């Protein structure tokens, strides 16, 4: 079989799938009693992570997670802020071992900065297993690219790519795993694009015409994202002539944009055209020439009107990403341990505005700002909730410190191992203040600090 035919074998193959149980067992020395999570991007345009499974590493370092999958996913396995990735297939059982690590050495640093890659060893030694196949393919691919980059990119030596195809066919010619075959096909497509082996029209005919949209395949979507970057505003010779500013302001913008994009023959497939539109809308949202509310309205319309469930997922994730922590959106919920060692939730504060302060005991700027909270607390405590969330790893460290500060009398919570709260609020620096309204929605993010005008915002929100 010719390599092109082999690698494209399943591009026209459609499978209706049902969720099946997948199990991940393993060991994580050093992570005893810590939380281990598996998440995955809901889609491969926004990469908006969604939870799949959560468990505890037991006292001996063992863990087991069970999840239901209806397709192969690129899973992110994390302990604290440290993570690794692997592919998980439906109805499979995986036995893995995460290399020993001293997790608690990273307790007095910003976890976003100090996150480490977990080293993982898959206990399944079967060379035909998907992770093993992709690892072997990527190793050969990377070596070939490093050795021949200048010849491929600058000199356009297409014969090298022909030789590489033959080599990969010899190595992987007997593989039947459909995800891998698609992965390999679109990895080579990226090489063809880089070397200009085909022009853009030829690439589209080979890889997009009459082909299914492979939403969950990492390399398909990598190629998709590269091919259709700035497509509707610059790359497409026909669509770039469309006046999107006028369309966005007009009636039924969703229908108008979809119709306008039919002039591009590459996008004759409605499902593909709608996905390209969504990618383009996300780019327009981040372009100052376009009104963000108008763009969001079309994304919302796509979510409501699309006939394609995967496009709906992309639209939903796009809305979540683009509106995250924006005024009027729901503040991320949390339940954390209070200074008196009771569970305390954000939703329990509905009815009054909330001032959230993320801080640590080792942050001098945090302590200066918190000293300024006390007079605000005394003045507004009847009408405003003040909550300081310590990102110190150990509850005892927070408690010891605030017990020394007798004027710290408002609500104090501790992150513990609930690191997702920092992720939900995009806490990259300390202190970070957030102002939440009476209904539990973001009023201002980031809010002013006490030293720079927080009281002015409090007066405004209380007047509403």
Image (cartoon, rainbow, N blue to C red):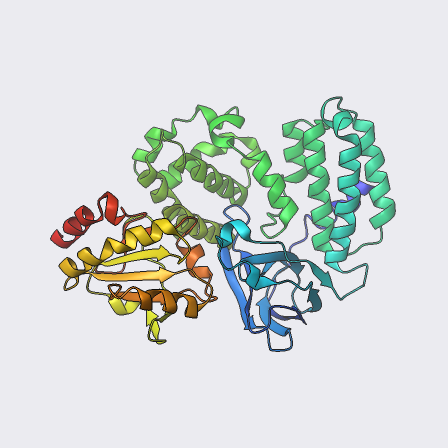
Image position of 154 with respect to 91: above or below:
above
Q: Residue at x 75, y 66 (%)?
A: 123
The quadrant of the picture occupied by the N terminus is top right
- Residue 203 visible? The answer is yes
Residue 89 image offset from top left, x and y in percent: 66, 63
Q: Residue at x 34, y 44 (%)?
A: 297
Residue 14 image offset from top left, x and y in percent: 64, 55
Q: How many marks?
A: 0
Left-right relation of 175 to 31: right
Please, which residue is most extreme toward the front here? 404
Residue 240 image offset from top left, x and y in percent: 47, 26
Q: Residue at x 38, y 36 (%)?
A: 256
Please, which residue is most extreme toward the left here? 463
Please, which residue is most extreme toward the bottom here? 59
Of 88 and 243, which appears nearest the observer? 88
Quadrant of res 76: bottom right
Please, which residue is most extreme toward the top here? 155
Residue 266 image offset from top left, x and y in percent: 57, 33
Image position of 146 with respect to 321: above or below:
above
Q: Residue at x 35, y 49 (%)?
A: 365
Left-right relation of 164 to 371: right
Image position of 18 with respect to 367: above or below:
below
- Residue 431 visible? The answer is no
Quadrant of res 226: top right
Left-right relation of 371 to 172: left
Of 345 and 189, which appears nearest the observer? 345
Left-right relation of 53 to 416: right
């Amino acid at each position: 079989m010719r390599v092109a035919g082999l690698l494209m074998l399943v591009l026209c193959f459609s499978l209706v799938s049902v969720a099946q149980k997948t199990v991940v067992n393993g060991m994580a020395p050093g992570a005893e009693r810590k939380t281990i999570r598996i998440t995955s991007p809901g889609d491969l345009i926004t990469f908006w992570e969604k939870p799949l499974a959560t468990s505890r590493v037991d006292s001996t370092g063992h863990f087991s997670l069970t999840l239901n999958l209806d397709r192969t996913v690129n899973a992110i396995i994390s302990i604290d802020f440290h993570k690794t990735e692997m592919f998980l297939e439906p109805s499979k059982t995986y036995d893995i071992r995460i290399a020993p690590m001293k997790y608690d050495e990273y307790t007095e640093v910003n976890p976003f900065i100090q996150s480490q890659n977990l080293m993982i060893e898959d206990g399944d030694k079967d060379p035909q297993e998907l992770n093993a196949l992709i690892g072997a393919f990527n190793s050969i691919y990377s070596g070939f690219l490093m050795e021949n980059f200048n010849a491929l990119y600058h000199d356009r030596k297409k014969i090298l790519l022909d030789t590489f195809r033959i080599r990969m066919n010899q190595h992987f010619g007997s593989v039947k795993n459909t995800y891998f075959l698609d992965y390999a096909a679109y990895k080579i497509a990226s090489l063809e694009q880089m070397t200009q082996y085909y022009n853009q029209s030829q690439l589209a005919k080979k890889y997009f015409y009459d082909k299914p949209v492979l939403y969950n395949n990492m390399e398909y979507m990598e190629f998709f994202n590269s091919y259709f970057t700035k497509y509707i505003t610059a790359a497409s010779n026909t669509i770039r002539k469309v006046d999107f500013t006028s369309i966005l302001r007009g009636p039924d913008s969703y229908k108008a944009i979809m119709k306008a994009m039919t002039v591009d023959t590459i996008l004759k497939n409605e499902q593909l055209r709608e996905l390209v539109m969504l990618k383009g809308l996300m780019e327009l949202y981040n372009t100052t020439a376009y009104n963000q509310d108008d763009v969001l309205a079309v994304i919302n319309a796509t979510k409501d009107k699309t006939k394609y469930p995967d496009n709906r997922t992309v639209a939903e994730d796009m809305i979540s990403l683009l509106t995250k922590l924006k005024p009027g959106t729901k503040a991320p919920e949390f339940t954390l341990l209070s200074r008196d060692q009771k569970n305390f939730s954000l939703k329990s504060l509905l009815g009054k505005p909330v001032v959230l302060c993320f801080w640590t005991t080792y942050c001098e700027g945090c302590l200066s700002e918190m000293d300024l909270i006390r007079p605000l607390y005394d003045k507004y405590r009847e009408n405003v909730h003040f909550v300081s969330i310590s990102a110190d790893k150990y509850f005892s460290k927070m408690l010891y410190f605030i017990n020394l500060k007798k004027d710290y009398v408002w609500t104090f919570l501790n992150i513990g191992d609930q690191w997702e709260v920092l992720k939900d609020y995009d806490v990259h620096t300390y202190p970070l203040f957030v102002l939440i309204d009476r209904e539990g929605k973001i009023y201002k993010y980031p809010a002013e600090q006490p030293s720079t005008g927080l009281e002015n915002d409090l007066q405004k929100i209380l007047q509403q």
